[in-house]
Image (spheres, rainbow, N blue to C red):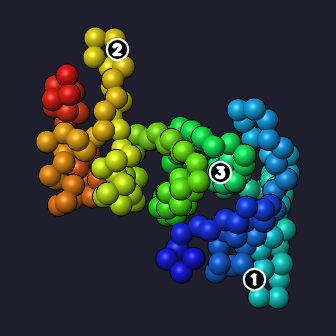
């Protein structure tokens, strides 16, 4: 798309980079709880030259993005991605988050991360509703909306969600939420 977000139709050909006219073809077999990528092929057109790559030639990050896309276009209505930024080039992380936000209109998507800067790629109104803090108090796991706290709510209009996270000590939020 013109704004740099990844747009993926619900078929087996995924446009990944308009500039190089890159296309990846993936044949995926869905299994309960996982996606099995049996073959991947990347075709890139550079002027008059065409380059073909097998899945053995592709980086772990690229294969991870393909698996995430395959999961999102699959039949499941809930997807969980743990530490989504692992192996993904930092410049692609924003596009990936934008893609997941678009996909969240059709399914529930849960993303975990230890990277607060990924929160900056989420619009403030969505961050208010969709960012949660998961923590333990005396062995019991607790969860709460991150921006429901007075410590974070007012900062969000002045800073990005990731900056608010970095600026607010977790221990203060835990004490505030107990």
Q: Nearer the viewer, mark 3 or mark 1?
A: 3
- Say which label, 2 or 3, has the lower sequence index: 3
Residue at point 69% right, 53% down? 73
Q: CA distance from mark 2 to mark 3?
A: 32 Å
Q: Dot 1 surroundings within 10 Å: few (below 14), some, or many (20 or more)? A: few
Left or right of residue 117, residue 65 in this image: right
Q: Nearer the viewer, mark 2 or mark 1?
A: 2
Residue at point 74% right, 56% down? 58
Vertical position of residue 120 compared to residue 15: above or below: above
Report x, y in % for residue 111.
49, 42
Q: CA distance from mark 3 to mark 1?
A: 29 Å
Tag 2, which secondary structure? strand
Residue occupied by mark 1: 46
Q: Nearer the viewer, residue 25 or 152?
A: 152
Q: Residue furthest top?
A: 138
Tag 3, which secondary structure? helix
Report x, y in % for residue 50.
83, 78
Tally the marks: 3
- Say which label, 2 or 1, has the lower sequence index: 1
Q: Which mark is residue 140?
A: 2
Q: Which mark is residue 101?
A: none
Considering the image in quadrants, where does the N terminus appear? bottom right
Considering the image in quadrants, where does the C terminus appear? top left
Q: CA distance from mark 2 to mark 1?
A: 55 Å
Report x, y in % for residue 37.
80, 46
Residue occupied by mark 3: 72
Report x, y in % for residue 154.
14, 52
């Amino acid at each position: 798309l013109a704004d740099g977000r990844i747009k993926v139709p619900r078929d087996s050909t995924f446009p990944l980079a308009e500039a190089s006219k890159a296309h990846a073809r993936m044949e995926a077999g869905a299994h309960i709880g996982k996606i099995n990528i049996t073959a991947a092929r990347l075709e890139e057109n550079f002027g008059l030259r065409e380059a073909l790559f097998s899945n053995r030639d592709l980086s772990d990050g690229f294969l991870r993005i393909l698996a995430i896309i395959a999961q999102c276009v699959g039949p499941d209505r809930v997807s969980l991605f743990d530490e989504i930024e692992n192996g993904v080039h930092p410049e692609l992380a924003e596009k990936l988050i934008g893609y997941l936000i678009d996909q969240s209109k059709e399914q529930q998507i849960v993303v975990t991360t230890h990277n607060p800067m990924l929160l900056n790629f989420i619009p403030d109104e969505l961050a208010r509703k969709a960012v949660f803090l998961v923590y333990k108090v005396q062995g019991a796991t607790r969860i709460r909306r991150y921006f429901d706290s007075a410590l974070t709510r007012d900062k969000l209009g002045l800073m990005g969600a990731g900056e608010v996270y970095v600026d607010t000590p977790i221990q203060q939020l835990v004490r505030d939420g107990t």
